[in-house]
Image (spheres, rainbow, N blue to C red):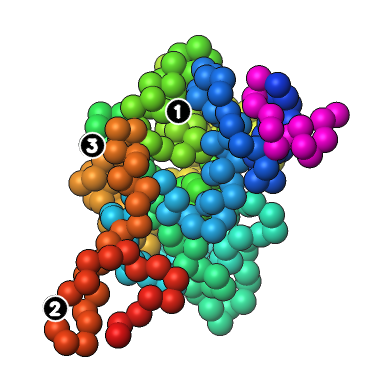
Amino acid sequence: MPGIDDLVNSTVTNFPAAAPIANALGFQKTVDVPQELPSYDMRSAEDVMTRNRNPLFGIPASTQPTDLPTSIPAYRGSTATKDGLETIPLQPFTKGNTWGWTPNNDPETSTFSTNAPKAIQNVYKYARLNGAADSLGYPALPPDHIGAFVLKEGRSDLGYNGGFDGSTKDNKYRKELASKYNLPQLDVNFLGVVKAKQELADRKGIPFAEAWNGTGKNAFGQTGAEYAKDWEIHRQAALHPKNQQLMDLIQRGYEDGRKHGFPLQDNSYEDAKPHKKAVPYKKGGMIDKPLQGNTKII
């Protein structure tokens, strides 16, 4: 097994198995071998590390929202209540890199409880990703579907587990996206899954939610058809007035995606720059510079 010095100076060519580890540890310097999806391992490792710090990772700084809500009430669908809703507060982030909410049965709180801002940002991010895809003619989930998956799955990533279809057709599609757009690898893979699931639904004549789950049983014992039936209850719940704040968040992300589209590879250098804001100084006038660190109004 190569040592640290080897990892520091390695390329994917020299140590393909060690390269993702080296990159994740921050040691690897270069990646010089194009793959079918360029630098897949490197980009995936960067996704995990950066997204944990900032769920809006991948959105150009100049168009990232700075005023998203920090708490949102959410109500899941239910067949046991008069209004068809049940209050199950959900908490974001279980241990590790799990991007979701776990049930919190405290009846006193009905919000995406502790550490909610990151979970809310992630819902916005996925809504924006779908809105951009829709505006550019790629397969995408509409806002009510996004709301349904958030409530049904109780996860800000809509239940997406990070994989990809892997067929020749899917690989070609994701390669085209990655070559044209400056998207995190996880987002490219997500878009590929949406396309593959939509094609499965069309081919078999089944609801998209059934295709999303798969026609077999999931880990909770639901078949795809049962999942789709339950999902429809949550879709109706998403449209209930009590979930207006959740749908406003999703609609905002979707419309921002339609407005801005995907960031282009050709603009990746400019998009990576810190967003510049005009900062007032005490004798009047403005300073046009990036806000960094402890920079503050003079």
Packing grade of label 3 (10 A; few <14, some 14-19, many >=20) is some
Point out residue 27 in the picture as x, y percentages from the top left corner.
Answer: 67, 42
Three-letter amino acid code at disc 2?
Gly
- Relative to residue 151, is residue 24 depicted above or below? above
Quadrant housing residue 10? top right
Magenta stretch containing residue 12, yes or no?
yes
Residue lying furthest left in this view?
A: 285
Magenta stretch containing residue 243, yes or no?
no
- What type of secondary structure mainly makes up the magenta span? loop
Disc 3 vs disc 2: which is toward the camera? 2
- Relative to residue 132, is residue 246 depicted above or below? below
Residue found at x 34% / y 42%: 269
Residue lying furthest right in this view?
A: 1
SS category of the residue bearing label 3 = helix
Which is nearer the N-term, disc 1 or disc 2?
1
Q: Which mark is residue 192?
A: 1
Quadrant housing residue 131? top left
Relative to residue 63, is residue 156 drawn left or right? right
Question: How far is disc 1 from disc 3 in space, using C-alphas?
Answer: 16 Å
* Circle 1/circle 3 CB separation < 8 Å: no
Residue found at x 45% / y 50%: 57
